[in-house]
Image (spheres, rainbow, N blue to C red):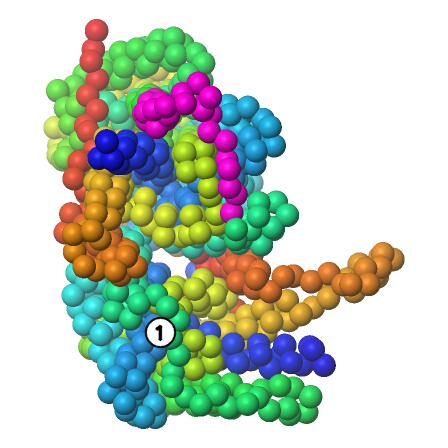
Amino acid sequence: MILTQSLVNGVIRGGELALLAIGLTMIYGILKFANFSHTEFATLGAYLAFMLTTTLRINIFFSAPIAVMLTGLVAVIVDKLTFKKLRQAGSVSLMVLSIGLSICFRSSIQSIWGAQIRGYPIDLFRGMEFLGIRITPIQITILIVALVCMLIFHLLLIKTRIGKAMRATSDNLILAQASGINTDGVIMWVWFIGASFAAIGGILIGLETQLRPNMGFAILLPVFATAILGGIGSVYGAMMGGMILGIVENIGISFDFGILINIVGISRPEGIYISPSYKPAISFAILIIILLVRPGGIFGKRGDR
Amino acid sequence: MLSVKEVYKSFDALMALKAINLRVEENSITGLIGPDGSGKTTLFNVLSGFYSKDAGQIFFKEERIDGLPPHEIAKKGILRTFQITVVPKRMTVLENMLLAPFGQVGEKAWRVFLTPGVIRRQEEENIKKALRILDDLGLENLKDEYSGNLSGGQQKLLSLGRALMADPEVILLDEPTAGVNPTLTRKLLGFLRELRERGRTLVIVEHDMNVISSLCDIVYVLNNGEVIAVGSPEEIQRDKRVIEAYLGGRKDAHS
Amino acid sequence: MAIVNFFIHVIIMVGIYSILSLSLNFQVGISGLMNFGHVAYFAIGAYTSALLTMAGCPFLLGLFSGMALAGLFGFIISLPTASLKADYWAIVTIAAGEIIRLFFLNEQWLAEGPFGLRGIPRPLASLFPENYPIFYLLMAMFFMAFTYFIMEVLIRSPFGRALKMIREEEALASSMGKEVHLFKIHGMVIGAIFAGLAGSLYAHYMTFISPDHFMPIETFLIWVMIVIGGRGNNIGAIIGALTIESLYISTRFLKDYVGIPADILASLRMFMIGFLLVIFILYKPEGLVSEKRRSHKIK
């Protein structure tokens, strides 16, 4: 069934979106600005893993975690050098700064590795048929990795001290500071974890498709849509939002809107479909609708502006 | 002229205004006093359209104005000043004044090109009026200074001057003398009296009982969002409930 | 001779980008509207003018239609302004701009999609068989001056004054009777109209446009121009356009003198743009030219 295939594709895409959106939503919630350079961490992680795998010939199982850690580190350094200086500035200045940084990241990566498409030197496993659904081992990997990451993060938030500190800081920065929490340290960890997750997402996307310098930027708006849909600052919202958006995107292009017309009596045998190249437009449209109707998202306060 | 009937306003669990009934007579100066947090500024916000009320009605000259957005209420003739003076910092004092009058033809973009003559004449008139008011207020020499560079007291005078430019029928003044030195305060009070002479209606939120006594015809006392007393300044100063409200408040502060 | 042609090209591009810069500055710097989807109006102006003139319409009709449609789109985008926070609205503008680009990319029946439109007619080409670029340069300069003039008049008018107050203290403006939402819509539409003008000039000069010319990076480029030039300042906007375009175009020369391949040079150029944006936002956010203080002459 095409619909089940879309569902599966959607869930996989949802996992990718969620991984990238977690960091974005945390930073947005705590530091109160839209970080347009967030998805560049995905690109950076993907390309660092690529470099480690090809140039240094390290096995992907090792180069991936190393690349993820490195990206997390880069994020912490970038915050110290740039965003930290503008903590008191308005959200728009920070946004503009992040746009400048995203341009810097993207163009540096392109300068070093070139604009051509790259791929990981992994054997392409053939897709399998499973209950009528086509799926590749890499896609299964993506699902497992995404779920494991979210589970680990959930445990971190609930069980560990740093996790509790993160939740407190995310709820109310000033109150957290007043309670004696080292919010600067928390912020540093949020950048590290957020960027690491983005890097993981980037590597997974690179494994599933390919590496291009603008792979992060291409997914930026869908990731924003995910974060906003789930409610800015809500990590669980980002996870749910990712799933919903991934599924809607995929079903949206495989859904025959001709069915709706048929109800009215008009028949269109060849069906009415949204062209696959409009796929990103689906998440843009959802983004716009959410912001107009319920900016707080699923887990935000009603009418939260 | 302005009447408030059974107005309620709450924020989540907090009931900020309870069954507020108020009448403001034309050409009077009405005072609004009460301890901090009693709901004075909230009431002003509801009156000027910045907050929506939960229940009740507000009438201005027999017309209902509750539910209207702030700019509509302003255009009907009710202006307000803010407790913490707000000025567009990077605009000059004169520009601040020129922002105030209603019905400026030049504020419509296409008219700027279609009827420049009309606009120029309006501007000249407005500039003359603004300079007169600034002169009265003693701010004329600061006319080209960025309003953000003025002292707190001068900014207060400027916001009063702005209100005067617009010639409103009713002005809601939120703590007009807070942070103003005694000399300036006397000047201010003189202005407010003159405004009443010229037929304006004022509602003043104040903490300073001297100001209230010397200016107001009638005073409403608020406590915990309710009106607990109405009367002349002398009457409410002797009112037991009022004394309790203020003293009670102070007692809590010390415990 | 080639040098002269090169300079003519640079000045024409500076002219076009100055109009873009001035128009975005009106939205961001004067009206306080954080528009990150400005390229959409550029694209609408370009495509509308191109398609109409290719179908036989005279140049001026194409030009005005492009401006009108761009303005219409600006109107639609600014409708939700009243209810959204600045950064949420900024995201909406980017998303909307991308939807426009995807529309032109996918609807091949309209504008050839990814292949772009070729053979866009040049206005009055027959009158100037030689030295056409000089004519276009004069036309571009004329429109740039025209835009500057309109912007200046608007900014100095009571309309501009009200916009500035709304930019600075929106709640105060409301309490003084200014209908904030209406003013913001005006600000957006005016900026959009002139971006459409720039788009039309661009299309007829390049004679070839495709969706690739209207990627989000174009909006960011214009933002760099106004950040460097100084927000809220028309002269600054032009200086910003001049600076960035000159840097942009002159680094193309490096290809011949330094042995760096063209595409890496392109990304280095991009890096420089991003770097300038970062440095200016961090250390000189008010830009190179600051807003003039308005003092009134009294008769």
Q: Position of residue A255 (x, y in %)?
A: 69, 68
Tell me if I can see residue B8 in this picture: no
Name the quadrant of the C terminus of chain C: top left
The residue lying at 19 percent from left, 42 percent from top is C287
Q: Position of residue C38 (x, y in %)?
A: 41, 44
Left or right, residue B3 beside residue A91: right
Question: Badge 1 sits on which subunit?
Answer: A
Q: How many marks?
A: 1
Magenta stretch contains residue C136? yes
The residue lying at 23 percent from left, 31 percent from top is C1
Identify the residue under disc 1: A42
Q: Which residues are magenta?
A: C116-143
Viewer-closest of C56 and B241: C56
The image quarter containing residue C259 is bottom left
Viewer-closest of B38 and B94: B94
The image quarter containing residue A131 is bottom right
Q: Badge 1, how many Cα within 10 Å: few under 14, some, many 20+?
A: many
The residue lying at 34 percent from left, 11 percent from top is B120
Viewer-closest of C286 and C211: C211
Label 1 residue SS: helix
Q: Is residue C141 above or below residue C265?
A: above
Viewer-closest of A237 and C141: C141
Q: Position of residue C111 (x, y in %)?
A: 57, 45
